[in-house]
Amino acid sequence: MGIRFILMVNKQGQTRLAQYYEYLTLEERRALEGEIVRKCLARTEQQCSFVEHRNYKIVYRRYASLFFLVGVDNDENELAILEFIHLLVETMDRHFGNVCELDIMFHLEKAHFMLEEMVMNGCIVETSKANILTPIQLMEKSS
Amino acid sequence: MAGPSMMETLFQRTLEDLIKGMRLQLIGESAFISKAVEEIRREIKSTDLHTKSIALQKLTYLNSLHDVDMSWAAFHAVECMSSSRFADKRIGYVAASQSFNESTPVLLLITNQLRKDLTSVNEHEASLALECLAKIGTVDLARDLTPEVFTLLSSSKVFVRKKSIGVTMRVFEKYPDAVRVCFKRLVENLESSDPQSLSATVGVFCELAAKDPLSYLPLAPEFYRILVDSKNNWVLIKVLKIFARLAPLEPRLAKKVTEPICEHMRRTGAKSLMFECVRTVVGSLSEYESAVKLAVVKIRELLLEDDPNLKYLGLHALSIVAPKHSWAVLENKEVVIKSLSDEDANIKLESLRLVMAMVSESNIIEISRVLVHYALKSDPEFCNEILGSILSTCSRNFYEIVMDFDWYVSLLGEMSRTPHCQKSEEIEFQLIDVGMRVRDARPELVRLARSLLIDPALLGNPFLHRILSAAAWVSGEYVEFSLNPFELAEALIQPRASLLPTSIRVVYLQSVFKILIFCVNSYLSQTETLADLEPEVPDSISQRENSEASDLASVRALFEREHDEAFNPGVLDRPSTDNSIEDIGNAADGDGQTSTFVSFRKNGFTRESIVNLVNLVEVAMRPLSVSLEVEMLERTCNILGLIEVLKRELPAVFQNEKVLEKEELEVLKLIKLMNDAFSEELGPVSTSAQERVPIPDGLVLKDNLADLDEVMGDVKLPSSSSFSLESPYNGQRMDPASCNVQSKEDSEASSESTSLLAEHRKRHGLYYLPSEGNGTISNDYPPANDLKSGDTNQDDTEDFVKLTAQSLVSKKKPNYAKPRPVVVKLDEGESVPVVLKKRDSRDDLLSGAVRDILLGDDAVKLSSSIKGKEKVNADPLDSKENMHDMENSSHRKSSSRRSKQRPHRKERGQTNPEKLGVEKEEHGGKVKSKSSHRHGRQKSRQKAEGSSDIIAETPVIPDFLL
């Protein structure tokens, strides 16, 4: 299914966004997030952005105080996922204007909305920023 | 109800309030959350859908980020989904997608809601429903909503269409029959001019092909077109992934796609696409030299980048090439070796794997040297990774790549001395394993064992204890290769050995016992050489053979006689008589038959040294004889018992009498027997050996061996020479008689020498292991602290059972000779379990349906283009038009004939009865789609087997790729 989950975690290890594409129980999620955060946040800038974990790998990228962690199947293209993360950040940047952690905290549902447009069932289906943002803008206008 | 509801609506905290409140809370996060949940529980009961949805939104937020349970709110989510207000509806859908799973009871309630929204004119409502279905779709939902998804697949609104494409994957997965309905439209989307739909469709096929590539081979022309035409890197990456799966199934396809892939690799500026090309080539197209060469060039570029990501991926790609093209690794070896010291553990690990992939017989010594040296400098974790990979690489397939075992043994020694080494269990295993399998390595093993045992510093390191245990076992088992057994014994009884845990000390004690027996025996046998010269000796033996009873009596008499003259330690303090040593030396020299080796060793066993050893051991053992550990106590008592017997029965040795008395020869014999028992070789035993041993005729296994004495009484004592038990490796069987005899001898030994022990056993029988426990000994690999047969503390019965079992097992052990030192292997049972690649052979409903569709489809629509119908897999099927695209002029040769025919066929359109007739004949008139489906499987099997049928059929296959 390509992408298994997308996490946004701040430097302190607090989860800011969690999107799973397979059903996990609360306990499983908690355990998984704990392990991953411990593993990835300890790494330095000079180390590579790929971490093997259990039977999949995590591609992560840090933007300011926020870590974007994407869990993918082993044969997924790591660099493409890095680009995907970057696209996500750019999209949010375009929408929020200079996106920061607080934006995601207070507009979590919008961040989710963007992800929904971009990823379907673990597959990346949309990569155009304009297309991703159209429905959100429509909804904002209507409300 | 209206009142509070109104109030709640007015004063309800929004999600934003909640988040702000959480940031400002002073009562602790969990308290705040539980208060918030309480509030939500109240609000969510509101009849006002807006209030309800906001409560649900807050709950969803808390669930997502703070792990608050929200399964109780499932029904409320359903309620919100039915709201007419889009924002509320959305909240309901998000909550449902996030919290519902297969076992959510209210799932049954949402089918109609989803259907309604899927058919809604509002594309955003449809999109919500699609997203929800993609996440929580169950078998029922998938089945019930297939028609709606089908409709949306050809929607004119791209926004909905791309999502409906995305959802098909979930639908197919849950309800394979949906393929029959939707697949055609999905395929049509592959040709869609709209990039969004195309991208989504390719993504779906990528996932589908990952599960069962074979079914999608017929779509290869479509994918090929995308590969050549598409400018979208996301799509190209997905298509490459599809080809990586398909190419191994169809060599002509591989040939066809190699060039465009290389073209992409050369031209693209995107690293992600370039890397995907590299990965496809090295993973699936590794037979195409030029492509691989290009890929390796690109890998090299990646390796030389400063970006750790690219470096990691480069190494990763190299490790995929390595098995088939080791030159690629060798070309880049400096980078690989340098990466060993990278600051990223992942990169280090990856390069370590590569280094190990380069290992061969010729360079293993060099590489190991470098790595062990490197391990010294690394952090503990990586150090152990290195050691672990050396150990596993070298021991792979019975030390396949190790040519020089002396070197390997010393490497093991070096590794065990590496600080941070935590691989002691593996090293322990290998030390013993090499000892048992490789005869030629034993002298070196003993040398290593000596150096390990003799170093008191090692005893303090708990990580090394297991290795010391192996060293102790080796030193006892192969003591005959030792240059100085006395030194070994001293090392084993050094005071610091008390730092060891009991489980390892007992191995030490057992080895001391073996060494002691060995030394005494060596000494006595050289004295016996002297005695042999005297005429009366044969008589004494024959006499003994004649009457067992009188023999025992005389022994008893001897015992009584010597009881009076207590052993006088003062004797030892007397300056030893030089002439006696010389005597022995002369005797040994004078004996022409003695080999130089033996004479050399014999010279080492002087009377004085033996006496010294015995006394030293005795002194060391005394304090242990009150140990609380039964195992230690038992073994200590064995040793002390032996010493006692020696001193009582061999005053000649201890009191400086040169000539052995008649009766003393019996002790001599006893020692010899024990020594023989110990020097029987232990071989590796397959885990299943015991089951494979047939119970020989005449062997009656009884619980109660009361009649053992009777059996034993009948057996004559053979001459001592027959006790050099044939090693199992000679392929000879130990004859059952000698086996019996030995056990008899052992029983005799035990009864004579360890009366003390016997008494102890009688009193503390409770603490002794039950005999069944040891009976299974030959079932498995003998552990280091395994008691050997003939051990005097064993019950007679046990000895018997064990020896029998062992001798039987040894029959089953073949050996494989090799030009290098022989490494003993067992033919079966011990072989490395063959890891069968788990071909996902579950009769996948999905792939079945897909094939039915793809092939069935053709049967109706395009059968005319299928020639002969033989090659289902390779058929172009629905790709008539594409054929032209695919046909590069350079490839005309084989297809010119067909290309002439094709337009003709196309005109004919529908079914070709003649061809179908052929088909039906061939497949026994079965339904076309089914038979061809089956045939497809058959075909794949044939291909796998490299059956010659393929060649025969080849001309018939429409060469759609050429």
Image (tube, grey):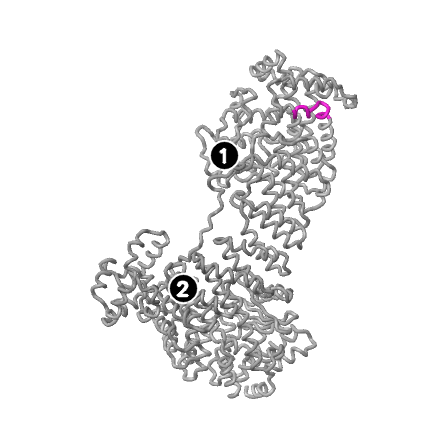
Q: Amino acid at mark 2?
A: Val
Left or right placement of residue B475 versus residue B217 in this view: right
**Chain letter for the residue marked with disc 2 in the picture:** B
For the C terminus of chain B, the quadrant is bottom left
Vertical placement of residue B522 versus B923, above or below: above
Check disc 1 and report its element: helix, strand or loop: helix
For the N terminus of chain B, the quadrant is bottom right
Q: Amino acid at mark 1?
A: Val
Image coords of residue B582 (percent x, y): 71, 18
Query: Which residue is drawn at the image coordinates 66% and 70% (left, top)?
Result: A12
**Stretch in magenta:** B600-611
Check disc 2 and report its element: helix, strand or loop: helix
Which residue, given by chain and number where applicable, does mark 2 sit on?
B257
Query: Residue B302 versus residue B604: which sits nearer the camera?
Result: B302
Residue B662 is at least partly visible in this image: yes
Which residue, given by chain and number where applicable, does mark 1 sit on?
B809
For label 1, the crowd category at 10 Å Cα-Cα, with few meaning under 14, some 14 to 19 and many 20 or more, is: many
Query: Which residue is drawn at the image coordinates 60% and 55% (left, top)?
Result: B337
Can you tell which quarter of the image residue B533 is in? top right
Query: Which residue is drawn at the image coordinates 45% and 81% (left, top)?
Result: B125
Query: Residue B99 versus residue B40: which sits nearer the camera?
Result: B99
**Chain letter for the residue marked with disc 1 in the picture:** B
Q: Residue A35, which numbered label? A: none
Image coords of residue B330 (percent x, y): 54, 53
Can you tell which quarter of the image residue B925 is in? bottom left
Vertical placement of residue B466 versus B253, above or below: above
